[in-house]
Amino acid sequence: MPLIAAPVTTPPEPPPAGGGGIVLPDLGRATITYYDPTGGVWPLTRRSLGWYTLAEGVSGLGATPYELTSDAHPRGGARLRHVQAQPRTIVWPLWVGGDTHLQFVERWRTLATAFTRTLRDGPGVLEIARPDGTRRRIEVHYQEGFEGRGSRGFGRIFDSAVLSLWCEDPYWVDPVSVIVHREQGVGEDFLVPFPSVSSSQVLGATTVTNPGDVIVWPEWTITGPASLVTFTHTDTGESFTLNPTAVGHGNLLPGQKVTVRTDPPQVRYQNGSNWIGALNWPSATLWGLAPGDNSVTFQLDGSGPGSAVDLSFNPRYETA
């Protein structure tokens, strides 16, 4: 009597051995890593782990989606009034397998938890690394897709899932920060023992370059001594001033630090206390840095040896 058997199903071809990555549509070879909200690290392009990314079907890595708001023009057509970046959805196919059914099930369950926990514990991070060492990251929330094929031959020792990952911030971020440091050095008597000039980075006008595609919102760290600190974006005229006496502290003493975040607005003294009242509201504008060169000025009143300003930001990009 003939036996009825399920058809034999074979997994798709894996990424080329030794490549350490996959070839993504229109983007070339890359190595992919997912970081879950608890700090777990999940390489997605190493088949030896029992799971890997299926390049065919990956999407959502291109330019940010936008919503355009326009007003009708009386002579025909329309005028663009506002552009708003929209959340993006990344589609990510994964293949999961095992030598036995139980090994496969364990990997399937563990991976599912690593992604779905973003709905409870905060976003995870998807990172794409290039052969030249550059990396770009984006925060993701699991939306749907960890369901399996539901076809004969699948679900025993291998299966595939097509994940939809929702990104509230649609821009990709370079995890390596750009840091600009300006410090006042120790002064020298010009004539003693012979004519000389102090070696220091002068606090004042400077140019800050944003290598990304979109505006970034930097973080500032001020180190005393200083009595009043003003940051001005020379190109736009926007500025904000930090006045330590406005919160009852008095002038910043040598070595004392204050950190100003521009998005979301936050001002913290070195002990963590809230100094948001030290800014010159309501005229303060916590400005960002546009792509390219930005002319800025740091003005520290009451500065002295050791006075410093550190600006840091992570470039943001349209695509992976």
Image (cartoon, helix red, strand yellow):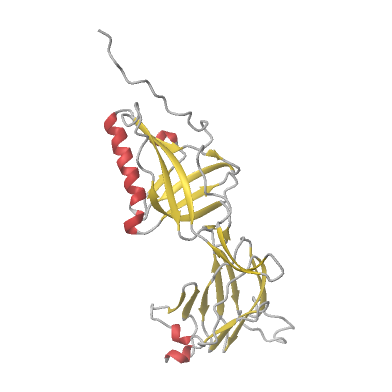
* Furthest residue toward left: 1
Viewer can see residue 32: yes
* Furthest residue toward right: 195
**Residue at x 53%, y 74% (from the top left corner):** 220
Q: Is residue 75 above or below residue 149?
A: below
Relative horizontal placement of residue 42, taking residue 70 as reference (left or right): left
Check the picture and name the quadrant holding the N terminus.
top left
Viewer can see residue 249: no
Q: Is residue 105 above or below residue 127?
A: above
Position in image of residue 121 (x %, y %):
33, 58
How many numbered markers are drawn? 0
**Residue at x 68%, y 64% (from the top left corner):** 77
Position in image of residue 253 (x %, y %):
48, 86
Relative horizontal placement of residue 243, taking residue 296 as reference (left or right): left
Q: Within the image, what quadrant is residue 204 found in?
A: bottom right
**Residue at x 60%, y 46% (from the top left corner):** 132
Position in image of residue 129 (x %, y %):
53, 47
**Residue at x 73%, y 83% (from the top left corner):** 194
* Furthest residue toward top: 1
Position in image of residue 42 (x %, y %):
40, 45
The foreground one among 257 and 275 is: 275
